[in-house]
Image (cartoon, grey):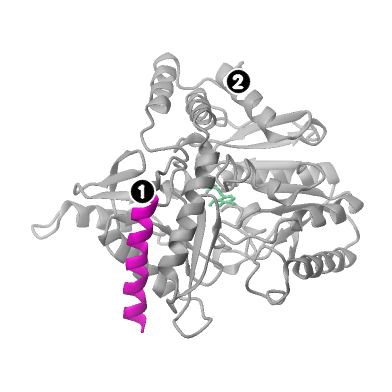
């Protein structure tokens, strides 16, 4: 550290010197968060913030939840890690609870350490089960950062390679308010997407393994299709024997308020063939996984393990976190407080040219920003809002399917209170007005 450098500047310089350039950091002066409690976090300089992004949708219930901390320390006091070669009680218990909650008959659960690895496993299962390398994904989708999952990502901004182990076909439907069908009403939009899907499938030799889709696109800017689109898709997929993988990494566990899983908004005749999850279930511990009916899960004809997937200490954390979520009806809280937050943000944005749309479900709310007076996505507006909100003590995320992010992503811990929602919405309203003035 030089005489003129603060500890914060020094850490930032060391970060730059040793970590990859493509590892994105928020804010002109990146934050170092050192403490968390409830819905709040604190930085190394003692500033306190309302965390409207829940880590990165990873703090599902609350920061420093005592129940999770206790489960972790008790398990760590016994044994941190064993191996998938031995029986693991916390893993079996969590798998039983998740299988029961999944809605998938005869469900099997395989634990991973991330969403990427969960989707990778889902693709392995689907391609093995179907004996095909063709996969359907949605435009503007994001499914992870590995070689297999970037090959599905329906947006160049998040796909650093054009090489692919699959032949990927991209369907319309994930984004309701942009693209060629945006002007149609919901029923016509769905019909157009289904016709497009049939057309895509007509161009294949009929051996597509699976469709992978996020019920609400996360990194893509919290966009969702009309309810029912995936029911209509499923009917087509089933005719062709194609599996449906619902990527619930962002949407699972009641985040969307009305439903425990995002796919349930679509009133499908049955559950997806495969569900993947990660992010919030571990409340910050690295827990991901795949749920599939036994016939699909057991289609691999070679042994496979994840050394750290299902590690007892992470299972204990996830088990305690899930128990808290269910006991305190945080899905219901997400619906009630999320509904109020959506309305409050809509009023705060009313009349502002910088806001194109405020949308969302439960505690998964997107504010799409444009250059005032145009329909052009404005990553700069999003950065201005992030900086202004941070100055005012609120942290939000950004995303969106354009070269850089132009949608504010609001996804606080699901225990958010009404007072916190109102305060956060007021701060964001001020930040939006600041961006509007600066851009105007
Ligand atoms: N799937 C979705 C929908 C995601 O949003 C993400 C991460 O943002 C992933 C998969 C990848 O998860 P991870 O970063 O845990 O590998």
Q: Is residue 14 visible?
A: yes
Q: Which residue is mark 2?
A: 93
At a point 32% along the width and 79% down the height, the residue shown is 437
Q: Position of residue 251 (x, y in %)?
A: 59, 47
Mark 2 or 1, nearer chain start? 2
Q: Which residues are magenta?
A: 420-440
Helix, strand or loop at mark 1: helix
Query: Which SS does the magenta portion mostly show?
Result: helix
Q: Residue furthest top?
A: 78
Q: Position of residue 346 (x, y in %)?
A: 47, 65
Q: Position of residue 248 (x, y in %)?
A: 62, 46
Above or below for 309 versus 429: above
Q: Which residue is mark 1?
A: 420
At a point 54% along the width and 37% down the height, the residue shown is 113
Query: Within 10 angstroms of label 2, few (less than 14), some, or many (20 or more) residues?
Result: few
Looking at the image, which is closer to me, 12 or 364?
364
Task: Give left or right: position of 258 versus 407.
Answer: right
Identify the disc placed on residue 152.
none
Location of the C terminus (image quadrant)? bottom left
Looking at the image, which is closer to me, 70 or 309?
70
């Amino acid at each position: 550290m030089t005489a003129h450098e603060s500890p914060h500047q020094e850490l930032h310089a060391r970060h730059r010197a040793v970590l990859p350039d493509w590892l994105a950091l928020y804010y002109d002066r990146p934050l170092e968060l050192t403490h968390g409690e409830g819905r709040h976090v604190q930085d190394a300089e003692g500033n306190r913030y309302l965390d409207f992004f829940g880590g990165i949708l990873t703090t599902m219930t609350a920061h420093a939840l005592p129940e999770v901390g206790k489960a972790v320390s008790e398990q760590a006091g016994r044994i941190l890690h064993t191996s998938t070669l031995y029986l693991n009680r916390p893993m079996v218990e969590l798998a039983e609870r998740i299988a029961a909650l999944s809605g998938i008959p005869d469900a099997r659960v395989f634990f991973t350490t991330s969403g990427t690895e969960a989707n990778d496993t889902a693709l392995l299962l689907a391609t093995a089960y179907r004996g095909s390398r063709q996969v359907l994904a949605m435009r503007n989708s994001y499914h992870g950062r590995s070689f297999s999952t970037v090959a599905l990502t329906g947006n160049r901004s998040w796909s650093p390679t054009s090489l692919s182990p699959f032949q990927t076909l991209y369907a319309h439907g994930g984004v309701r308010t942009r693209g060629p069908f945006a002007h149609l009403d919901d029923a016509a939009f769905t019909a157009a997407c289904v016709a497009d899907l049939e057309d895509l499938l007509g161009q294949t030799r009929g051996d597509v393994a699976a469709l992978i889709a996020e019920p609400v696109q996360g990194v893509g800017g919290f966009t969702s299709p009309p309810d029912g689109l995936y029911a209509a898709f499923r009917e087509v997929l089933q005719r062709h024997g194609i599996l449906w993988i619902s990527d619930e990494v962002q949407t699972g566990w009641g985040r969307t308020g009305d439903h425990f899983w995002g796919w349930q908004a679509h009133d499908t005749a049955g559950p997806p063939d495969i569900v993947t999850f990660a992010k919030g279930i571990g409340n910050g511990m690295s827990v991901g996984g795949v749920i599939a009916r036994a016939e699909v899960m057991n289609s691999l004809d070679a042994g496979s393990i994840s050394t750290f997937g299902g590690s007892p200490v992470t299972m204990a954390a996830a088990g305690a976190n899930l128990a808290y979520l269910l006991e305190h009806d945080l899905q219901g809280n997400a619906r009630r407080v999320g509904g109020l937050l959506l309305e409050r943000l809509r009023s705060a944005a009313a009349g502002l040219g910088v806001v194109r749309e405020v949308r969302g479900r439960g505690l998964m709310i997107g504010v799409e920003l444009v250059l005032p007076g145009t329909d052009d996505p404005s990553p700069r507006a999003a950065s201005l809002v992030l900086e202004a909100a941070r100055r005012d003590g609120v942290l939000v995320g950004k995303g969106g399917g354009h070269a850089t992010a132009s949608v504010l992503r609001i996804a606080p811990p699901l225990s958010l209170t009404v007072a916190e929602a109102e305060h956060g919405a007021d701060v964001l309203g001020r930040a939006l007005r600041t961006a509007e003035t600066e851009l105007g």
